[in-house]
Amino acid sequence: MRELDAAQQAAKAGGEVLARYFGQGVKMRTKQDCDFVSDADIESERAIIEVIRSAFPDHAILGEEGQAADVDTSSEFLWVIDPLDGTTNFAHDIPHFAVSIGFYWKSQPVLGVIFNPIRRDWFHAARDEGAFANGEKVTVADDSSLSESLVGVGFYYDRGAMMEATLASIRDLFQQKIHGIRRFGTASLDLCQVGCGQFGAFFEYELSPWDFAAGRLFVEEAGGRVTNCRGDDLPLAKSSVLASNGKLHDSVLEIVSGNLPDQDWD
């Protein structure tokens, strides 16, 4: 599959940039409070785009550091890339971050590649072909109740209503006797942990499309379910995200939808 080969080559190229900066140290520039952008993000994105453009010069590319507003997300062939998912981890020398590359055809995800260049962990999924972690096919957890499950969560940079809503949902989940909450700070890898059966579910109240474009397909191809936090189909736009093994989806949805903060999307 040409697209898979290109995605893996692009992820490797972007990952090599991140590994070099991570090893040598990186100068951070603040975008806003608690949100960073670095030379590593920008150079990684350039490396990724160069590989994709050389293979598919006519395809549209939606990238975090590029001009996202100018990209038509309904393009027949669309690449959605995050050159550095987990920037805060990266900034604090925590080796839990990734390159994430999703490929959409006619607005539907057909390919996803996620790569942690420090751990050398590869995740990929292709429509109707399954989800794979380091070459091994994976499936979601078989948990049938929240009392059997570990739940992943993401916090947006907002320190107001969004944070309070997230904390309220965590409280309600603990009341269902879940095994625990984990917050690792890299949504693409969190979604992979759902697909690999480590989390029974994961939710976050605000993510951009490059945060979940590849990971959502990984969950679905592993046998799970992904919606927004109202239970609607996930759009290729800013959205809340709920991913699960499928069996737990309605139980978690009842909690996260009940605490969903007012916002301009979903």
Image (cartoon, helix red, strand yellow):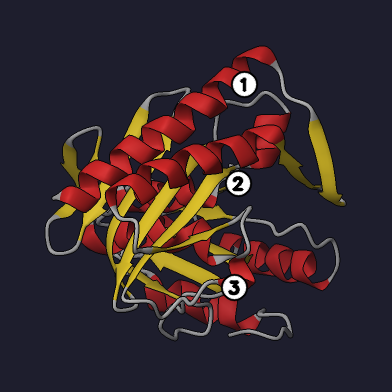
Earlier sequence position, callout 3 versus callout 1: 1
- Please give left or right for residue 6 compared with residue 43 in the image: left
Earlier sequence position, callout 1 versus callout 2: 1
* Residue 225 vertical placement versus 215 (above, below): below
* x 62%, y 21%: residue: 22
* x 46%, y 30%: residue: 15
- Give the Cα distance between marks 1 and 2: 21 Å
SS at badge 1: helix
* x 42%, y 62%: residue: 213
- Give the Cα distance between marks 2 and 3: 32 Å
Q: Is residue 177 visible?
A: no
Amino acid, disc 3? Asp
| Circles 1, 2 touching at the beta carbon (< 8 Å) | no
Earlier sequence position, callout 2 versus callout 3: 3
State the residue position of label 2. 183
Amino acid, disc 1? Phe
Question: Which class describes the residues within 10 Å of circle 2: few (<14), some (14-19), or many (20+)?
Answer: few
* Residue 69 vertical placement versus 28 (above, below): below
State the residue position of label 3. 70
Q: Name the front one of labels 3 and 1.
A: 3
Instruction: Where is residue 14? Give x, y as percent.
Output: 47, 35
* Residue 262 vertical placement versus 10 (above, below): below
Instruction: Where is residue 223? Give x, y as percent.
Output: 22, 62
State the residue position of label 1. 22
- Please give left or right for residue 29 compared with residue 155 in the image: right
Instruction: Where is residue 217? Give x, y as percent.
Output: 31, 62
Pick the front one: 5 or 210: 5
Residue 149: image quadrant is bottom left
- Please give left or right for residue 8 compared with residue 255 in the image: left
Q: Residue furthest top?
A: 24
**Location of the C terminus (image quadrant):** bottom right
